[in-house]
Image: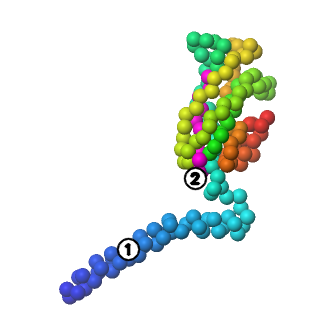
Amino acid sequence: MEKINYLIPFIFFLVISFALSLIILAQIFGGDVQEAVCQEKNKDCIQNKAMVDAQLYGWAVNEFNEEELFFEYWLYNYGNIEAKDVKVKCKLLSHPDEGYIEEFSEVHSFGNIASRSVVWGELSGVRPSTVNFNEEYIGYCYVESCNNCEILYKRIPDAIIMNEA
């Protein structure tokens, strides 16, 4: 009877140890399986590329110098390696009811962004004379180019139309 009392916890801990071992092995060798699947099916896997995206946080006119515009944005790298020489383009569009007219466009050479990270960026430029304060404007930013990376919006058909128009 005493052997049975010790046998039940032993089997319980043996099963848990085996399950944890399988989980650890799956974590260690899981990347190799993904890489093999990518090569086998000729899929466009981004394991060795950075995946970057920029999202506008806000834009404003400088209170102290009304000839200057500010664009603030978040820059994301979802990839496993560093993205290099990232360039972010910010635009200001007017007349959303009549079709978009580009009033302002400027590229910010951000530089490098570490793997799996988010950073804050800011771009400033000269306000065009066509931009007045009585109209409604839409601002947005996106990643225009980078080295050794893939740009997220280029994988989304609707985003391609908006960014490259």
Callout 2, which amino acid? Asn
Magenta span: helix, strand or loop, mainly?
Answer: strand
Residue bearing mark 2: 80
Residue at screen point 69% across, 18% down: 126
Residue at screen point 62% across, 37% down: 111
Residue at screen point 62% across, 34% down: 110
Nearer-the-camera pick, 95 or 155:
155
- The image shows residue 125 at horizontal and vertical percentages of 67, 21
Determine contact: label 1, label 2, CB under 8 Å.
no
Q: Secondary structure at mark 2?
A: loop
Query: The N terminus appears in which quarter of the rendering?
Result: bottom left
Callout 1, which amino acid? Ser
Residue bearing mark 1: 17
- The image shows residue 67 at horizontal and vertical percentages of 66, 13
- The image shows residue 104 at horizontal and vertical percentages of 73, 23
Q: Tell me, for residue 138, which label it has, or none.
A: none
Which stretch appears magenta? 70-82
Q: Secondary structure at mark 1?
A: helix
